[in-house]
Amino acid sequence: MTRAQTVLLYCAIVVLAVLACAAAFPGLLATHDPLQTDVRAALLPPSADHPFGTDQSGRDVYSRVVHGAGRSIGIGLLATGVALAAGLLVGALAGLAPRAVDTTLMRVNDVLMAFPEFLVALVVVALLGPGPVNIAIAVTLAAVPVYIRLARVQTRTLRSAEHVEAARILGVRPIPAFLRHVVPGVLGSLSVLATIGIGSSILAAAGLSFLGLGPSEPTPEWGLMLAGGRNVLGQAWWIAVFPGLAITLTVISATIVGRILRARAEGRTT
């Protein structure tokens, strides 16, 4: 790893650590009640009392960004975790199944992968209806095909590896041999991919919320806050800019960590 990569990695980890703290313990970082309104303090610019200014209802934008971290990051983590588990299950099944089953599963998977993830998520939300739970389901279904493809490839590669064959020769039954020697390797590859996928899931969830398909007001959520400030950018830019920066920093930091981990897993330096 080069020095520049090391610096980027440490910066990304620090950003993610701060965001994780905000998501887990928002009360430690927030300075105001994110739902408290004060029409007399509406649209105040950033100041010592309100570091990120206030919105149209006089709510503290900084506190809303802090409290919004839990919902925005939580949806991304939940969607990525479920997609990883589903991808591992279906991908491993395809890798071990007879050729006809494998071919059928992969053709369906290829059709899903032909469409952009955000478009798939948008269609799913349109069918299920708006709401944070449906957004999590939509983002999960949109992300699953990538994990299925990787899990299937890794399963087919590892099941014929020398250490797996040695376990079989020594009398280890197929299922224990698979769980002990194949699943950890597949899960390791999927975990590296999931690090990058977290950023994509958070971005997709924020995009759906921006379109009005997620939580409703006055819930503090980054995509919803971004949508709330788009009509007053010329008058109060801070309402949309700071939640937008939070989304950007989260996605970039998660992507940096994921790409560096993937490069190390593949034995590359760049």
Image: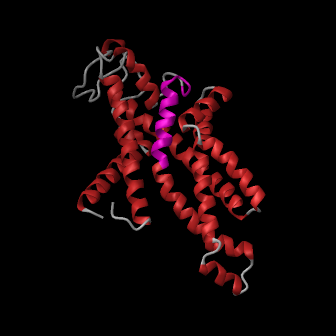
Residue at the image point whose x is 40% and y is 28% from the top: 33
Residue at the image point whose x is 35% and y is 41% from the top: 249
Residue 95 location, x and y as percent? Answer: 68, 62
Quadrant position of residue 245: top left
Of the 4 image quadrants, the one containing the C terminus is bottom left
Q: Work out whether residue 132 can be spotted.
A: no
Q: Is residue 128 left or right of residue 8?
A: right
Residue 88 colored magenta? no
Q: Work out whether residue 91 can be spotted.
A: yes
Residue 246 location, x and y as percent? Answer: 36, 36
Q: How is the image coloured?
A: secondary structure
Judged by its main secondary structure, the magenta piece is helix
Residue 164 location, x and y as percent? Answer: 64, 78
Quadrant position of residue 41: top left
Compared to residue 30, the image places residue 54 above or below, namely above
Q: Is residue 84 left or right of residue 238?
A: right
Residue at the image point whose x is 36% and y is 12% from the top: 39
Residue at the image point whose x is 63% and y is 57% from the top: 88
Compared to residue 54, the image places residue 177 above or below, namely below
Compared to residue 30, the image places residue 3 above or below, namely below
Residue 204 colored magenta? yes
Residue 157 location, x and y as percent? Answer: 60, 68
Furthest residue in direction left, as rendered? 48
Which region shows up in magenta? Answer: 197-215
Of the 4 image quadrants, the one containing the N terminus is bottom left
How many marks can you see? 0
Furthest residue in direction bottom, as rendered? 170
Q: Is residue 185 left or right of residue 19?
A: right
